[in-house]
Image (spheres, helix red, strand yellow):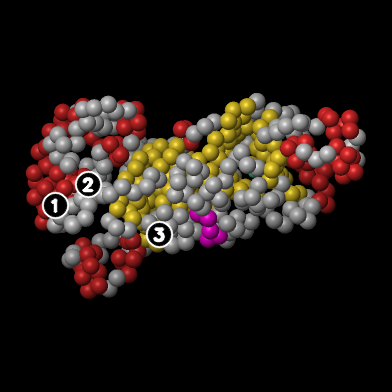
Amino acid sequence: MTPQDRDAPAPENANPNDDAQDAPLAQSRPDFLSRRAFVGTAAIASASLLSAAGALGQSRSDAVAGRAGEYASDPGPENKALLTLNPDSNLPPFTDRGNPAPFWYSFDLTAKRLQGGGWTHQVTEREIAQSKDLAGVNMRLTAGSFRELHWHLADEWAIMLTGKARVSVMQPNGKMFIDDVERGDLWYFPAGYPHSIQGLEGPGCEFLLVFDQGDFSEEDTFLLSETLAHIPPEVIRKNMGWTRAEWDQLPPEALYIFPAELPGSLESDKRFLGSHLETENQYTFHGAMTMKPAAETAGGAARVIDSTNFPVSKNVATGIVTLKPGAIRELHWHPNGSEWQYWIQGKGRMTVTLTGARARTMDFNAGDVGYVPSMAAHYIENTGTEDVIFLEMFKTSQYQSISVNEWISRMPDKMAQAHLKLPVSAIRRVPGGQYTVLPK
Ligand code: MN
Ligand code: MN
């Protein structure tokens, strides 16, 4: 049972997850249907007391009526597999209204570039049109395989999802940083700094890259191979000292992702660099998923990594949120940017509310991407049976969020009562701080 069910005057806003995990369609579950039909009349009566029909768009009583009886049935063609994963799109809560732009996409629906050594796919502004600030790439490298040495226009933030990799990045002053990363470790490479990623021993690795440009494309990076292949050989001879015969041995086209031998030890690579090893700036961050949380309750935890604890991460701030089953990431918004989400584990839903009384609820699973426009209020609810882990990503140097509960708790009684129309005793039940995650 969701908190809404407990507190609402009528259960017409039941989350389809509660009733129909395996069969979200009203008409395929007679008990679900008849329960809806039964509560429908009462719901209409109570809802019409709360709100008169607006001049524009759908009134609350319209929305409630549309969910009663057989009105929501869908006897025509439908993609049952998709609807099972998206109960809140199939039968939206009665509080949804209007037609906000899509804010969901899944890496599992994207074009996948597969080649010897691994694969890559991306969710960018092309998939979520309103996502202008950040774009994501999910990549796999088997043991020893490289993402070819390259650089690009955007800053690159990354988290290792499984396995291990060795990463390197060279600064403009010629010093190179090199390190090994494993699950929960991050890296950050500023735009234009040349870098490498290589899968290490065992099953290799899979990671998420996030770029501070919504229209970033993994197909549009500067590659070492392509750069050298398009410089006349006589210039290469003057520049590198390589003969024409040696130039002929260079890769004639992109390597991009390719298998290679495992590297030597990290220590030996650092020894090779000697005084050219960068030690001042740390381009990796270890243990982001196990560090001390910025907020923790019985409902879960939120860990924050931004330029205050990871100084090179100048343009990207991150929250790593864990939610226990039934728990919510409390209702909030971010005053300094849009939010790009990546779902690492679990199953949940999010409602995004916009100006003009628009709101939409969508469901998320591992591998999905969510998006929240700047300043739009939203919550995330764990609707599954395992912990949810997701990333909140922002194109900003510092993580910030505004808690609706905290705001309500700061309102003097008369101010709060005038707006909420509730008795003071109810208003003061609101948790009086920014708890970030709230238990079931
Ligand atoms: Mn890169
Ligand atoms: Mn958020």
The location of residue 210, given as percent across then percent down, is 56, 46
Does the CB distance between marks 1 and 2 fall below 8 Å? yes
Q: What element carries label 3?
A: loop
N-term-proximal mark, 3 vs 1: 1
Is residue 106 depicted above or below 399 in this figure?
above
Q: Is residue 257 above or below residue 313?
A: above
Residue 26 seen in render: yes
In this rendered view, identify the residue nearer to me: 208 or 137: 137
Q: Residue at 47% of width from left, 58% of height from top? A: 337
Q: Is mark 2 on a helix, strand or loop?
A: loop
Structural crowding at the residue carrying mark 1, measured as other residues with C-alpha within 10 Å and reported as few (<14), some (14–19) or many (≥20): many
- Say what amino acid the circle numbered 2 marks: Phe
Residue linked to disc 1:
47
For the point 22% across and 74% down, the residue is 414
Residue 277 lies left or right of residue 6; in this view the side is: right
Q: What residue type is labelled 3?
A: Met
The residue singled out by tag 2 in the image is: 94
> Is 8 located above or below residue 364 in the figure?
below
Magenta part of the protein: which range? 394-398
Distance, label 1 to label 2, CA atoms, is 10 Å
Please tell me how crowded label 2 is: few (under 14), some (14-19), or many (20+) other residues with Cα within 10 Å. some
